[in-house]
Amino acid sequence: MMRLKVFGGSANPGLAEEIAEHLSLPLGEMETYRFADGEVSVRIAESVRGADVFVIQPMSPPVNEHLVELLVILDALRRASAGRVTAVIPYLGYARQDRKTKPREPITSKLVANLLTASGADRILTVDLHTGQIWGFFDIPLDHLPTRMLLSAYFREKRLKNVVVVSPDIGGTGRAREFAAEMGAPIAIIDKRRDRPNQVKEITHIIGKVYRRTAILVDDIVDTAGTLVAASAALIGRGVEEVYACCSHAILSSPAIDRLAASPIRELVVTNTVPVSVSKRIDKVRIVSIAPMLAEAIGRIHEDRSVSTLFGGPAAP
């Protein structure tokens, strides 16, 4: 069996260290530096010839900086004769640009998939893709981990009463349905209208029974938090007693924290697929680590064992 090695980029070093610790491995030695004009350069500082290498690098802000760094790391590993290279991308950037909605628009998710493959990735390990169709953009194997087990476990421990799981938009219905199955709760759906990215025009309708219930809003990405805050206000207006929220990827761009602080949301539960800075860790924000699950998935991939059984899927034949 090939040697297992884990490297971490600069996007989320804390997560990389935690994963390596769970695997009882030291992080691989790598030197990363910038030229005066901002160009990134990488040198792998140890032998990886014939090794099974995993590179942990989410595309967190600044997304372009971290994407290019990942591409350079993958190229360096390929040229260093690594046996197999897996890009572990807990948060896959550009996932919201997965289709053409207007003439002359790009499909940037496909472009990113092509870049990763061309740079030397043999397979991808990621968490909660924005849409399932992105899976088909890759011509290499992709393993996809959902966070619903971790997040639902957090809420089950709180022993909330009369819970309803709410999707903040029509597109997230499938995600909410899976989360509701984990919680053993009914679902509701909010129909929203959006003029431009990151702006919600109005909440038009709530489908489902929410009166006098405890609502849990479920989303994959929270960027400016406009959708969640508008949805929470609409739910309170419909007689919901308490509103909680959860997401996989807490981007929390400005003015997300101010919006959350002023909103009726009691808690926003997130994972650490992207780093949550100290300035964003207000009392309402709770962080659940994805490191144990990623470490287990890496171990299974290295040993050619099933990954789907981690989240209740059938074992590979």
Image: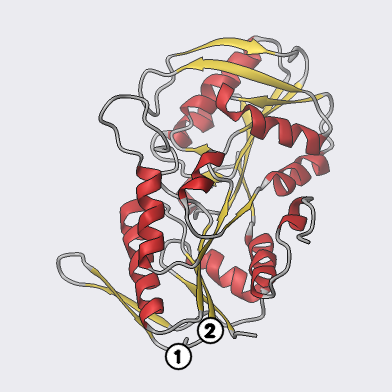
Which residue lies under the disc numbered 1?
47
Report the mark closest to the observer, 2 or 1.
2
Q: Residue at x 61, y 69 (%)?
A: 19
Q: Is residue 61 among what the camera can see?
A: no
Secondary element at tag 1? loop
Q: Position of residue 269 (x, y in %)?
A: 64, 42
Q: Is residue 161 among what the camera can see?
A: yes
Q: Amino acid at mark 2?
A: Ala
77, above or below 214, in the image:
below
Q: Position of residue 158 (x, y in %)?
A: 80, 40
Q: Residue at x 67, y 64 (%)?
A: 297
Q: Amino acid at mark 1?
A: Ser
Residue 5 falls in which quadrant of the image? bottom right
89, above or below 203, in the image:
below
Residue 41 falls in which quadrant of the image? bottom left
Give the total of numbered labels: 2
- Return the residue nearer the eye: 77 or 41: 77
Near mark 2 (Cα within 10 A), the count class, few <14, some 14-19 or many ≥20, is: some
Secondary element at tag 2? loop
Quick check: marks 2 and 1 in contact, CB under 8 Å? yes
Say left or right for 102 vs 20. Answer: left
Q: Quadrant of the N terminus?
A: bottom right
Near mark 1 (Cα within 10 A), the count class, few <14, some 14-19 or many ≥20, is: few
Q: Quadrant of the C terminus?
A: bottom right
- The label shown at residue 51 is 2
Q: Residue furthest left?
A: 37
Q: CA distance from mark 2 to mark 1?
A: 9 Å
Q: Residue at x 58, y 22 (%)?
A: 170
